[in-house]
Image: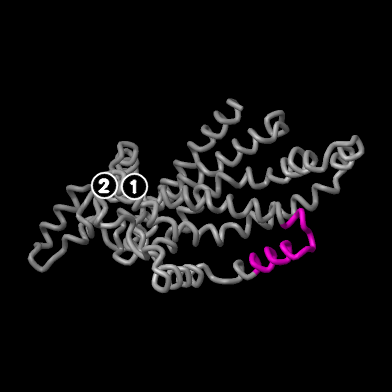
């Protein structure tokens, strides 16, 4: 296992360097620069040129890249000319909300998707199987924005069960009330994500359970007199869940990508909403940092998926 971890970490180093180069060139091709937000009729153009020269924007691109990557490794991602704050400060104020949304969304996705698939596979062709198949087919065909808006309208405005904006109530006082208020605010968007995320888990696991039950090792266990309950959980389910284990790492980081739409619709102040606002205001420093962060998470997710698969499947460790 340790050899696999070291191998994947070493493989990530050139991938990270290539990703930083791509993000750097993306920032270079974007209109404007860090001083665009400071431009005003009162600012002298000569003074603006001096500011650009002092910041090294007139240096060759490779000099700028080395300087930028050095700042990145020291945690300096620049300043948002729209918010007038360091990018690290802006991300630090919102990353907690996105992490909480990701955790709750991921937990609900597996808590809903796995029991649905198990129940459907055990009752193949029966009412509950047809019901879940119809539900997932309808859910898969509906755009995510429609589902989000429907849940906001139904549970936010009609029933008034959950808040439809923000991440904490202004009236919350003390750490316990603030924490409970954050959980209360995250339930509806996390449930909205889970309803759409369960489709893939349900389909993969249901098909895996139905295919695996006809394999030779299942027939051998049944011929030896092993109980059907033990056959299902120790043999069928354990082997069918491997694709889900492999995709678990991607599931962790995919919520950060999906949060762009989710947090914008629910007006949830996380990193996804920050990215949307940065794009609309052309805040290049924030955009490039969030893209770099998302790419880094994708690499980490791929590594986690391989490690989780190696942990649950000894054949991967042997190879």
Is residue 97 shown to the viewer in this render?
yes
The residue lying toward the viewer, choosing from 55 and 272, is: 272
The secondary element bearing badge 2 is classed as helix
User: Magenta segment, which residues?
Assistant: 120-137
Quote the CA–CA distance across marks 1 and 2: 21 Å
Point out residue 167 in the picture as x, y percentages from the top left corner. Answer: 33, 56
User: In this rendering, would 206 be left or right of 97?
Assistant: right
- Depth-wise, is mark 1 or mark 2 nearer the camera? 1
Circle 1/circle 2 CB separation < 8 Å:
no
Q: Is residue 163 above or below residue 228?
A: below
Say which mark, if any, is on residue 89: 2
Instruction: Give the residue pinned by disc 1.
Output: 179
- Of the 4 image quadrants, the one containing the N terminus is top right
Q: Is residue 134 magenta?
A: yes
Q: Nearer the viewer, residue 122 or 260?
A: 122
For mark 1, give the secondary structure.
Answer: helix
10 Å crowding of disc 2: few (<14), some (14-19), many (20+): few
């Amino acid at each position: 296992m340790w050899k696999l971890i070291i191998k994947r970490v070493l493989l990530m180093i050139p991938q990270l360097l290539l990703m930083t180069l791509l993000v750097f060139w993306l920032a270079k091709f974007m209109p404007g620069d860090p001083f665009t937000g400071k431009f005003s009729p009162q600012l002298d153009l000569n003074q603006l040129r001096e500011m650009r020269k002092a910041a090294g924007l007139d240096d060759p691109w490779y000099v700028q890249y080395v300087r930028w990557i050095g700042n990145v490794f020291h945690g300096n991602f620049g300043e948002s000319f729209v918010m007038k704050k360091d990018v690290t400060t802006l991300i630090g104020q919102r990353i907690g909300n996105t992490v909480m949304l990701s955790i709750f969304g991921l937990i609900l996705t597996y808590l809903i998707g796995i029991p649905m698939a198990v129940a459907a596979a055990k009752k193949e062709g029966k009412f509950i199987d047809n019901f879940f198949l119809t539900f997932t087919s309808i859910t898969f065909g509906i755009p995510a924005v429609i589902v989000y808006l429907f849940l906001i309208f139904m549970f936010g405005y009609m029933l008034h069960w959950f808040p439809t904006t923000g991440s904490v109530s202004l009236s919350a006082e003390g750490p316990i009330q603030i924490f409970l208020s954050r959980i209360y605010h995250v339930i509806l968007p996390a449930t909205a994500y889970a309803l759409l995320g369960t489709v893939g888990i349900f389909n993969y696991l249901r098909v895996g359970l139905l295919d695996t039950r006809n394999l030779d090792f299942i027939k051998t266990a049944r011929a030896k007199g092993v109980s059907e309950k033990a056959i299902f959980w120790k043999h069928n389910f354990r082997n069918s869940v491997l694709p889900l284990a492999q995709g678990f790492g991607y599931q962790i980081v995919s919520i950060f990508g999906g949060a762009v739409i989710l947090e914008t619709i629910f007006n949830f102040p996380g990193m996804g909403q920050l990215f949307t606002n940065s794009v609309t205001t052309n805040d290049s420093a924030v955009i490039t940092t969030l893209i770099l962060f998302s790419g880094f998470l994708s690499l980490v997710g791929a590594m986690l998926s391989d490690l989780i698969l190696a942990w649950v499947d000894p054949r991967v460790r042997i190879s």
